[in-house]
Amino acid sequence: MARNTGPQCRLCRAEGQKLFLKGERCYSGKCPVTKKRPAPGKGPRDRQKKKTDYAVQLREKQKLKRTYGMLEKQFKIFFTRADKMAGKTGENLIILLERRLDNVVYRMRFASSRNQARQFVSHGHVTVNGKKVTVPSYVVKVGDVVEVKENSKKLQIIKESLKEYTRSGVMPWITVDPDAMKGSFAALPKRSDVTDLSEIQEQLIVELYSR
């Protein structure tokens, strides 16, 4: 499974905003974005340069791609699929990304980050409708039940992650039974419901791939 194995905080610094790639660290004072450290290899003069349309579109794609922890080839596959669906391509893309199994595991608070969720899935700790699924990019359907495998429910790291459910709950299209460590993908999300991606301008990504 191809994935980005480099420093995660470096990616957030490059985009100039939090992508929430490191779980609890992203909410602490240790976050380099909170400290307003400059992007890798850039100084104040670089921030003053006017960006071209292409550069703005590229940065938007990179932000979304890195948020979901994907490499270019797989991201393009999801975009192509979104483009073939009825409706707005950009909104379709975000809805498809939200349906990825690793993202659903993260949204259900079974993992503190998408990267951790990806590991849980690939290591066989998760089932969908009672069957083990080890493909992080598996697209969940409405009504699917996602559950931590029985002999994995004793893992302390999952119990720690579920504390966020008590603090923040879950997204409106997901239901979770934290005691049973299982949840349901109750409905397709609306673009306006994905509030933590409100700064993403997905139309710029559509324009980039339309060049």
Image (spheres, helix red, strand yellow):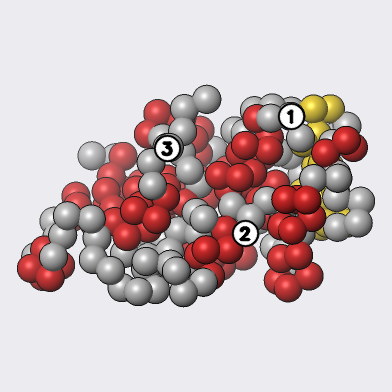
In the image, 172 versus 86, the foreground residue is 172
Residue that numbered label 1 is attached to: 124
Q: Give whichever of discs 1 and 2 has the lower sequence position.
A: 1
- Circles 3 and 1: CB atoms closer than 8 Å: no
User: Please, what secondary structure does the residue beneath circle 3 have?
Assistant: loop
Residue linked to disc 3: 4
Gap between marks 2 and 3, in whole Å?
Answer: 28 Å
User: What residue do we see at 50% from left, 54% from top?
Assistant: 21
Q: Which numbered disc flags the more N-terminal residue, 2 or 3?
A: 3
Q: CA distance from mark 3 to mark 1?
A: 20 Å
| Of the two numbered discs 1 and 2 in the rendering, the one whose residue sits closer to the viewer | 1
Q: Secondary structure at mark 1?
A: loop
Question: Where is residue 160 shown, x and y percent of the image?
Answer: 74, 58
Q: Amino acid at mark 3?
A: Asn
Between 94 and 4, the one lying in front of the other is 4
Residue 168 in view: yes
Q: Quadrant of the C terminus?
A: top left
**Neighbourhood count class around disc 3 (C-alpha, 10 Å): few under 14, some 14–19, many 20 upward:** few
What amino acid type should be assigned to the residue bearing mark 2?
Answer: Lys
Q: Determine the CA span between mark 1 and mark 2.
A: 30 Å
Give the left or right position of residue 43, taking residue 164 as reference.
left
Residue 192: x and y, percent?
57, 66
Label 2 CA crowd tier, 10 Å (few <14, some 14–19, many 20+): some
Q: Which residue is mark 2?
A: 190
Q: Residue at x 42, y 37 (%)?
A: 4
* Label 1 neighbour load within 10 Å: few <14, some 14-19, many 20+: some
Classify 199 as above or below 67: below
| Near-viewer residue (175 or 106) | 106
Please name the amino acid that badge 1 sits on.
Gly
Please give the name of the residue rendered at 50% of the width and 46% of the height, measured from the top-left corner: 68
